[in-house]
Amino acid sequence: MKEVSKVIRNLVLFTAIVSSLQSFAFSEGQDEGAVDTKEEVSEYINHHIKDSHDFHLFSYTNAEGERKHVGFPLPVIVWSSNGLATFMSSEFHHDDNGEVIVEKNGSKFVKLHSKIYELEAGATSVNLDESHHATNAHKVLDFSITKSVVGILLVGLFMLWAFSSLARQYKNKNVPTGFGRVLEPLVIYVRDEIAKPNIGEKKYRQFTGYLLTVFFFIWILNLLGLTPFGFNVTGQLAVTAALAILTLIIYTFSGNKDYWMHMLWMPGVPVLIRPVLAIIELAGAFLIKPFSLLVRLFANISAGHIVVMSLIAIMFTLKDSLGVAGATGLSLILSFFITLIEVLVAFLQAYIFTMLSALFIGMAVAEHDHEHHHDAEGHEIPDEEDVRADFI
Amino acid sequence: METLINDFSPGLFVVQIILLLGLIFLLVKFAWKPILNSLDERETGIQEALAAAERAKAEMQNLQADNDRMLQEARAEREAMLKEAREIKEKMIADSKEQAKIEGDKMIKQAQETIESEKKAAVAELKSQVAELSVSIAEKVIKEELSGKDKQLQLVEKMLGDIKLN
């Protein structure tokens, strides 16, 4: 009985999804060429790297020569000069060049290069200068449920489901079974290899929750980016910036007296040099560290996406010189191996981000109970910890 | 750089911060805390179990040693008892031998004494019978001898001759 109702529910869900896809596809059919030339390829890649307001799955040209797009429309939520405006992204009819104007709450919106612009009062169409910048429109605060937000929500729900079911397993057994048995070593890995050695046995516990969340969040999103759904969440600057700033907030607010002392008034150096060092240290703590975190993750993942897509595009761009079979074969082999590397990079970047976050937190909460050694002239000899801190 | 700044979406940033904070809060509450607590609990449990096993092993060794010692003692005791028993046995045998010898000697002595006395009695009887017999023979002989005058004389003479010889 239970099985039957489950099957029925799944069927209903599936039909709903498919029908929404189809209606979207048929109503929004637009004449837009297939991606063939080098310019189109780089345009397509650029477009993919950016966030998107609808969930595009695939496109095809039907018998009448019309270009059809299959995917979901996603809700657009923007804060315009006339207040909040919400509508579905399907109202833009897949236009990304500012041609389709959507009127809501007395504001006119256009979508230009994956960004939503509000036209100035009185303007009826968007004017572009030679570098494709809108001259009579401004950007709006865009809280839309974009493709990235969908990815974040999916991963968040998945993590909640997976790890709370792992947590529930411990209530009646000591060793988890099934999927939990896969997750448990990963949790232990983050705790024992990232949190404990970098933060220290005494204080690691209160930061482990954050580190675990960030590690799995980045890792799963990186892997999701490798699927053909084309998510590029960890390749969005806004997402990596949010992650990096959270780390910055955590290590700034958990920094102890020693941390601030070493940053603002470095002991053991001539007094004159101390303000200079303070400036360097402050820049390091508030700019360089979070910036290195956010750019590293963003650049690695974006680069991975660009490389994989470029290698896939070999199929079209080298078709003339290598023939269809040659270009396809070369593209398959290269993109296969680069995808393998990307699987490694997906883990590696999650590891590095978490590891560096743990390290920064560890430096902020470290207890300087050790005495510095001094050489004959009374200068401090840096110990291992200082060297490590300088190195980073 | 300009494209990067242009691509940065403040809206997505805000949404991401809110979602991430929510996710961290929910996961800490419903997943990480119980998971880490259970892991800690299990690890201390394992540590304790190992320590307990170690203690049990030590205890076992102690017991084993005790057992060995007791066994040793029991063996020694048995040995001692056996030895004692053997000694008692030997002593008893020796004693009984002694006893038997004494008894035997006594009996032999008695027997000898009895034999002696019997012998004496027999000899005495023999003597008396011989004496009686001799007397009767002598009586008869004398009766015979002294039946005639000549014979009496002859005897006297003979006896006189014997005396000479003496």
Image (spheres, coloured by chain):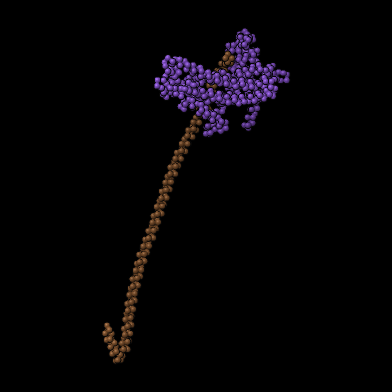
Q: Is residue A180 above or below residue B124?
A: above
Quadrant (top left/top right/bottom left/bottom right) for the N terminus of chain A: top right
The image position of residue A145, as x and y in percent, is 59, 19
Residue at x 62%, y 11% (from the top left corner): A131
Residue at x 49%, y 27% (from the top left corner): A196
Q: Is residue B119 above or below residue A61?
A: below
Q: Is residue B67 above or below residue A243?
A: below
Chain shown in brown: B
Chain shown in purple: A
Left or right: A290 as drawn, with respect to A134: left
Q: Is residue A137 visible?
A: yes
Q: Is residue A206 visible?
A: no
Q: Residue reaching furthest top?
A: A122
Q: Residue reaching furthest right?
A: A64
Give whichever of A277, A350 is nearer the camera: A277
The image position of residue A29, as x and y in percent, is 68, 18
Give whichever of B157, A253 is nearer the camera: B157
